[in-house]
């Protein structure tokens, strides 16, 4: 693969909204996206509102924030208004879903893949205490998960199939629509962990057609920690009653009714305790910018820049641990280097932002704010660091 020529890049028009990408080589958006300047303003405004308006802040501004930010997430994935709720992270969003289900034989299986993110795998393991049988579909060579293997594992014994859309380690993009269609045919529910796809792969929730989809702000959406989200298909929304609930999920939270619980019929049905207002306010600008740029344009650029990284890896003789085919690539390229952890630390000391994961080596993620020449620069730094550490 030879390195393609530099091209004019209209997405760089948004780069000035991310001043923190200047002076570093930011290749870590798969783990912590760059902070938009507006996030700092939003956090300062939050502190100001808290200090000046006190308790009045709830009615005047804060109670409207979760719905507004959830609406932006809906826009990003093409979901209906009211189908998204916000949560502190993906693990708690998925815990809400799983608390709606019974795991009674003969339909008590949870089908996942062994390459899913450990946090949700721990959650699924915990369901065994509630009567679930866990089916972890194994990876093939190169840590690849095959859709056919997932489909073969789903049958009338499956309560839910819960898998990643893009795998966190290798950045493999899975074709989940046929997997979820099969689940539906046999009466099972489906849940996509889209943390590594939404924001870099163009996700249309209706094309994917899961019953549930979860994701969060930290990575490709540049929204910082503390905001996860949950999509629940409107087709099943009101048939579900989370056991993990709370006063904000109640029909009338401010009636402070001691029970029995009457769950909200609308968008608050999957809420529980007090929303994380500062985190949602900090997440908002990143979501707005992603919506402005549009999923298709981000995906097109991501494929171009990951293609450039792959071409340079080949030119420099560096082993690649992530998929090469465009239809299999998420936003990250993994380089399976000798002494990868040391190489990673050496580069971090030089303000090259990237990370290391055992089993796949270093992970590099260009994003919509990345310039083509930064891809060339990061690869020449990687080559130097590999030489220095060998
Ligand atoms: C695919 C995937 N799921 C989930 C998570 C994180 O889950 P949580 O938001 O619960 O920390 C990550 C990364 O941190 C991830 O890459």
Image (cartoon, grey):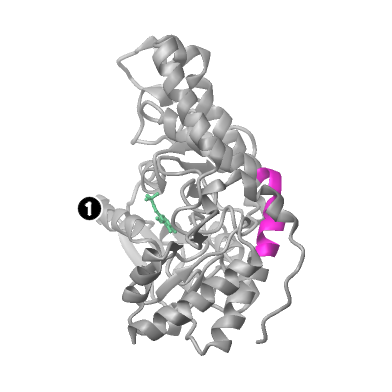
Occupied quadrant, residue 140: bottom left
Q: Residue at the location (49% across, 82% down)?
A: 320
Q: Residue at position x 62%, y 50% from top?
A: 205
- Front residue of this view, candidates 323 and 124: 323
Between residues 152 and 210, which one lies in front from this camera angle? 210
Q: Is residue 134 visible?
A: yes
Q: Where is residue 359 drawn, in percent x and y?
A: 35, 77
Does any portion of residue 140 appear in the rendered image? no
Of the 4 image quadrants, the one containing the N terminus is: bottom right
Q: Is residue 242 above or below residue 110?
A: above
Residue 377's quadrant in the figure? bottom right
What secondary structure characterizes most of the magenta part? helix
Q: Nearer the viewer, residue 347 or 311?
A: 347
Query: What is the quadrant of residue 275 in the picture?
Result: top left
Is-magenta flag for residue 293? yes
Q: Is residue 151 magenta?
A: no
Height in image: 363 above or below 46? below
Look at mark 1 in the image and give the residue it sits on. 129
x and y, in percent, of residue 328 in the image = 59, 73
Give residue 189's position: percent from left, percent from top. 49, 53
Q: Name the residue: 38% across, 30% down.
A: 272
Other-residue count near label 1 (Cα within 10 Å), few / some / many at <14 / 14–19 / ≥20? few
Question: Ligand 1 is found in which quarter of the picture?
Answer: bottom left
Q: Quarter of the image for the C terminus: give it.
A: bottom left
- In the rendered structure, the answer to whether residue 272 lies left or right of residue 303 reads left
Which residues make up the magenta segment? 291-301
Q: Secondary structure at mark 1?
A: helix
Q: Taking 365 as reference, is 87 left or right? A: left
């Amino acid at each position: 693969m030879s390195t393609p020529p530099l091209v004019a890049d209209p997405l760089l028009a948004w780069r000035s909204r991310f001043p923190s990408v200047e002076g570093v080589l930011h290749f870590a958006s798969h783990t912590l996206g760059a902070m938009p300047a507006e996030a700092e303003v939003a956090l300062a405004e939050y502190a100001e509102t808290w200090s000046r308006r006190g308790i009045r802040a709830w009615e005047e501004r804060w109670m409207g924030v979760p719905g507004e930010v959830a609406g932006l997430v809906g826009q990003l994935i093409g979901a209906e208004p009211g189908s998204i709720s916000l949560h502190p992270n993906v693990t708690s969003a998925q815990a809400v879903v799983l608390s709606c289900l019974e795991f009674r034989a003969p339909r008590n299986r949870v089908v996942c893949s062994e390459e899913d993110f450990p946090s949700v795998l721990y959650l699924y393991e915990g369901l065994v205490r509630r009567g679930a049988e866990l089916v972890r579909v194994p990876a093939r060579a190169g840590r690849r998960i095959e859709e056919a293997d997932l489909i073969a594992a789903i049958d009338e014994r499956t309560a839910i199939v819960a898998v990643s859309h893009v795998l966190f380690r290798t950045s493999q993009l899975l074709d989940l629509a046929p997997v979820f269609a099969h689940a539906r045919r046999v009466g099972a529910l489906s849940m996509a962990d889209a943390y590594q796809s939404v924001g870099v792969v163009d996700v249309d929730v209706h094309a994917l057609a899961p019953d549930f989809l979860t994701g969060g702000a930290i990575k490709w959406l540049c929204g910082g920690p503390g905001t996860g989200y949950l999509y629940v298909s409107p087709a099943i929304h009101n048939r579900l009653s989370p056991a993990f609930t709370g006063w904000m999920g109640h029909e009338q939270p401010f009636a402070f009714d001691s029970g029995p619980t009457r769950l909200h019929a609308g968008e608050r049905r999957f809420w529980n305790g007090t929303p994380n207002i500062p985190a949602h306010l900090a997440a908002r600008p990143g979501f707005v910018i992603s919506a402005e740029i549009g999923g298709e344009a981000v995906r097109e650029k991501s494929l171009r820049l990951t293609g450039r990284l792959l071409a340079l890896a080949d030119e420099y003789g560096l082993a690649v641990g992530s998929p090469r085919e465009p239809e299999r690539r998420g936003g990250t390229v993994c380089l399976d280097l000798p002494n990868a952890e040391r190489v990673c630390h050496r580069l971090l000391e030089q303000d090259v932002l990237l990370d290391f994961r055992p089993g796949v080596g270093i992970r590099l993620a260009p994003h919509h704010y990345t310039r083509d020449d930064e891809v060339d620069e990061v690869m020449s730094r990687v080559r130097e660091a590999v030489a220095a550490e060998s």
